[in-house]
């Protein structure tokens, strides 16, 4: 009886999981699609801003973002357990050093200097990319003739009313319905006297709004150069970053579509695009000068490393952050595997994988991690070298559960069985999440949005597993080739995507055609490079293991 069970286990251990290979590649290749869309939404930290932008692109970006990287970490956890069970700790460490640590180090050295200076590259390719000559948008009435509180008085720059509200005990750092302090409002509209008065009366100069932006962020975003100058002189920190990791300087690169949404829909302030663009250039110069002076006074010396590998004092891993996080997760896996590898853990793991009510356990744990990441929908993608432990814990849930699924008969035979229902349910939940994002001022919106995010990600993972198991379980040479190439494509794609975006940025053609061309050209160029420069070289061996041309067809 024991030998029969052992043989079944060995057979399971030696299975080639073509579907999960393809699924991991799918998660990576979706990154190219996602990044190809970013020049069309006006995200400030993105180095290319297309002249044809639309908030509609935010919907597919949010959808992909909501499940892509958790799916990748789930599959990574599965294959980490597979390698550990088959080869042992020593071979796992050797393999992961070669396939993860070494690529992270090599491509960090090669790519990060280029990515850190990509904005300069794209401006050279497309010089009108930043200072657009688009028509001015119509101005909105301020509607602040009779301020009702300190925030509206600060927005209008009405000093007398501001003093009256302060005398009556108004909270100088209080936030209104839009989660802006009075100083945020004064900075947004560039009311210099109001800014000075508020700071003199004790306003927190680097206070955060609901998006974690400071008054300096908003002043720079709206091109209020005089307000930026005053805030910097009063001690505002030019290096602070908001929820999407933008510094005040980064906000000066925001695209027209995003700027119009923030100005017209959210803050309801007048907007004149050409004037704002000119103001942003002045703001950028002021911020860069302030950062440079701070570095000099702090004793920071400029050398090749600080010039090419640091961005205003920070080391940014860019899209290679997933490799960096994998190093932490695999280390934790090895430690926990040896400390907690007893029979009781195996029983608990078996139950968590095989139980029909697994979602009841997985969703609350995911909800907790999602809630404390403070993201609207989907996970954090912090790119800093300093570990984000909440983010690591979140991805660790998927990595760990993927590891537990290896060797489970239930996972092989039943997971994703009802994949069409999973996808339909995920779409319904995603629609609910969009509704919550639209009604963000509702008291429970963030909690419901977090719950939607936690349910959506697992439904999409189970759905993707079922879909790929149905159509990609058999050995398919072309699919296997794409699976092999995906690692190289993802690691090297970002500069290619951004350069292509810059080439298309000022062309007067529909944005959807640009997006499709950028995605196809990027994939085609990189597949050619993989076939003729990578696959049969030491680079290909580092990424995927040794490949031979003998009897191989593509």
Image (cartoon, rainbow, N blue to C red):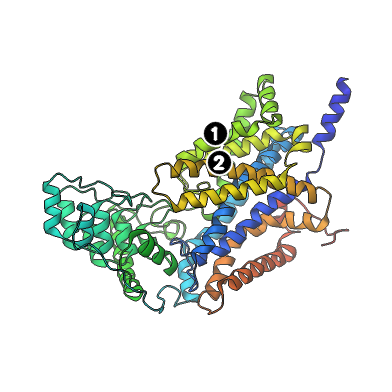
Residue 440 picture location, percent across and down:
42, 49
Which quadrant holds residue 551?
bottom right
Q: Is residue 350 above or below residue 178?
A: above
Classify mark 1: residues with Cα within 10 Å, few (<14), some (14-19) or many (20+). some
Left/right of residue 188 with respect to residue 170 in the rendered view: right
Q: Earlier in the sequence, mark 2 or mark 1?
A: 1
Provide the residue designation for mark 1: 364
Residue 163 picture location, percent across and down:
12, 53
Residue closer to the observer: 409 or 445? 445
Left/right of residue 521 with respect to residue 451 in the rendered view: right
Left/right of residue 275 with respect to residue 510 in the rendered view: left
Classify mark 2: residues with Cα within 10 Å, few (<14), some (14-19) or many (20+). many
Asked which secondary structure carries label 1, the reply is helix
Residue 123 seen in this snapshot: yes
Left/right of residue 198 with respect to residue 103 in the rendered view: left
Q: Is residue 177 above or below residue 489?
A: above
Q: Residue at x 45, y 39 (%)?
A: 372
The span from disc 2 to disc 1 (Cα, nearest Å) is 8 Å
In which quadrant will I find the C terminus? bottom right
Provide the residue designation for mark 2: 454
Q: Residue at x 63, y 71 (%)?
A: 517
Residue 308 picture location, percent across and down:
46, 60
Are the two marked residues, 2 and 1, in contact with CB atoms closer than 8 angstroms? Answer: yes
Residue 407 seen in this snapshot: no
Numbered circle sitting on residue 554: none
The number of numbered discs placed on residues in the rendered structure image is 2
Which quadrant holds residue 405?
top right
In which quadrant will I find the N terminus? top right
């Amino acid at each position: 009886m024991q030998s029969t069970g052992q043989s079944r286990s060995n057979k399971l251990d030696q299975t080639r999981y073509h579907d999960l290979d393809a699924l991991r590649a799918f998660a990576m290749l979706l990154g190219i699609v996602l990044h190809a869309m970013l020049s069309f939404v006006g995200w400030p930290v993105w180095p290319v801003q297309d002249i044809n932008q639309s908030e509609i692109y935010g919907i597919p970006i949010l959808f992909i973002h909501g499940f892509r990287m958790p799916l990748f970490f789930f599959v990574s956890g599965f294959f980490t357990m597979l390698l550990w069970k088959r080869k042992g700790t020593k071979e796992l460490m050797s393999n992961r050093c070669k396939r993860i640590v070494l690529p992270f180090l090599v491509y960090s050295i090669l790519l990060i200097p280029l990515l850190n200076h990509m904005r300069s590259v794209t401006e050279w390719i497309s010089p009108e990319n930043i200072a657009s000559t688009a028509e001015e948008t119509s101005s909105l009435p301020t509607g602040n003739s009779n301020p009702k509180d300190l925030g509206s008085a600060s927005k209008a720059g009405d000093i007398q009313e501001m003093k009256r509200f302060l005398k009556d005990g108004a909270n100088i750092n209080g936030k209104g319905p839009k989660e802006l302090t009075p100083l945020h409002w004064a900075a947004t509209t560039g009311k210099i006297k109001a800014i000075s008065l508020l700071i003199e009366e004790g306003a927190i100069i680097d206070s955060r709004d609901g998006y974690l932006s400071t008054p300096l962020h908003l002043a720079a975003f709206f091109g209020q150069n005089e307000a930026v100058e005053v805030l910097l002189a009063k001690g505002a920190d030019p290096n602070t970053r908001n929820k999407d990791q933008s510094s005040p300087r980064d906000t000066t690169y925001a695209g027209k579509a995003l700027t119009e949404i923030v100005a017209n829909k959210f803050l309801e302030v007048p907007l004149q695009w050409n004037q704002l663009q000119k103001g942003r250039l002045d703001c950028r110069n002021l911020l860069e000068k302030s950062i440079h002076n701070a570095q000099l006074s702090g004793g920071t010396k400029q050398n090749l490393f600080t010039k090419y590998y640091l961005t205003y004092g920070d080391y940014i891993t860019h899209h290679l952050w997933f490799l960096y996080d994998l190093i932490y997760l695999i280390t934790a896996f090895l430690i926990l595997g040896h400390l907690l590898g007893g029979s009781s853990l195996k029983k608990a793991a078996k139950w968590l994988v095989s139980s029909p009510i697994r979602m009841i356990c997985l969703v609350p744990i995911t909800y907790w991690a999602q809630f404390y990441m403070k993201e609207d929908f989907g996970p954090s993608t912090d790119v800093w070298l300093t570990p984000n432990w909440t983010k690591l814990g979140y991805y660790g849930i998927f990595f760990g559960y993927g590891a537990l699924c290896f060797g489970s008969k239930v996972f092989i035979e039943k997971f994703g069985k009802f994949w069409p229902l999973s996808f339909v349910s995920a779409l319904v939940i995603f629609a609910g999440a969009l509704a919550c994002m639209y009604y963000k001022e509702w008291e429970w919106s963030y909690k419901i949005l977090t719950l939607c995010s936690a349910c959506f990600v697992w439904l999409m993972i189970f759905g993707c597993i079922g879909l790929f198991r149905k159509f990609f379980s058999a050995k398919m040479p072309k699919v296997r080739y794409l699976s092999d190439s995906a690692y190289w494509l993802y690691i090297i794609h970002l500069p290619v995507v951004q350069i292509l975006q810059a080439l298309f940025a000022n062309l007067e053609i529909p944005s959807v055609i640009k997006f499709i061309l950028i995605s196809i050209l990027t994939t085609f160029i990189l597949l050619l490079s993989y076939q003729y420069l990578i696959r049969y070289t030491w680079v290909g061996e580092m990424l995927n293991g040794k490949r031979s041309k003998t009897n191989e067809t593509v």
